[in-house]
Image: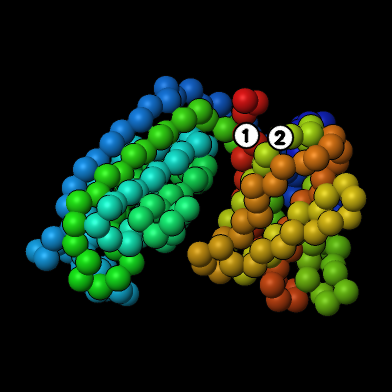
Amino acid sequence: MKTLLSAETLMRNLAMSSLIVPLLLPLSVAAGTESFTGTLAKDDALQPDRNAFSDSYTIRLEEGQITSVEMRSASFDTYLIVRAPSGLTHENDDFEGANTSRVDFVAEESGDWTVVATAYGAGETGAYMVDVDAGAIAEIRVIEGRLVPSDGQSLKGEYLDTYELPLDAGTPVTVYLQSYGFDGYLVVESPTGRFWRNDDFGSVDRSRVGPLTPEQKGVWKVHVTSAMAEEVGGYDLRLTIMPES
């Protein structure tokens, strides 16, 4: 079992596994808000999936930045898309009604993000407002690992690495898995034996579980495996731990 918080306890418990060293990425960015106002019109760009008019804006975010983006309109059914530099998207149609859309997320990467203000239905037009609240930076911990044939295996033949994650009560955490050369599969287990699983988060090489908020202090387990038996390859396991409020 590998423990995420202490370098001393990141020991190999499965023969021949690679030594894994956690990286702490401290970031300090001032919180800020930004607003955009606009009007969907018939000469705007079209979203091809719905033939809906849209406007796009660019915002700068840092990895781990806690962010909320909200779109409102009195004229049409709003639809909001926030796209990372890599293309990963966060989307919302109705947030407390058809005239408001909102996404709350922790930025998975640093760079220029795109906010797409659009409508749910084709041909809808009218005025709108978008508010962006980019807040504090969450703590990011990264582990580089590899599934290899000498790892332990599940009953169905998938190789498996397991890590321990001590967490305090009320500390939200999100676990991301980026796999290289195989279809990664992520499993998070609570101290009481409850499981959260994810195979594909936007693509076959990404998985995400969370945010999860422990109700009591305890040791969680993070299992890194694959969707198919005997798949091998490298991976990055990233934990986003929210700051205390």
Which residue corresponds to mark 2? Answer: 171
What is the secondary structure assignment of the residue under circle 2? loop
- Position of 201 with respect to 132 (left or right) is right
Q: Residue at x 50, y 36 (%)?
A: 66
Which residue corresponds to mark 1? Answer: 242
Labels 1 and 2 touching (C-beta < 8 A): yes
Alpha carbons under labels 1 and 2: distance apart: 6 Å
Question: Of residues 122 and 190, which is closer to you in this image?
Answer: 122
Looking at the image, is mark 1 or mark 2 earlier in the sequence? Answer: 2
Residue 178 percent across, percent down from the top left: 58, 56
Q: Residue at x 86, y 63 (%)?
A: 152
Is residue 106 something one can see in this rendering? yes
Q: Is residue 82 above or below residue 59?
A: below
Q: Amino acid at mark 1?
A: Met
Residue 115 percent across, percent down from the top left: 32, 50
Question: Of residues 136 and 76, which is closer to you in this image?
Answer: 76
Is residue 223 something one can see in this rendering? no
**Across the whole image, how many numbered discs are drawn on residues?**
2
Image quadrant assignment for residue 93: bottom left
Q: Residue at x 48, y 23 (%)?
A: 28
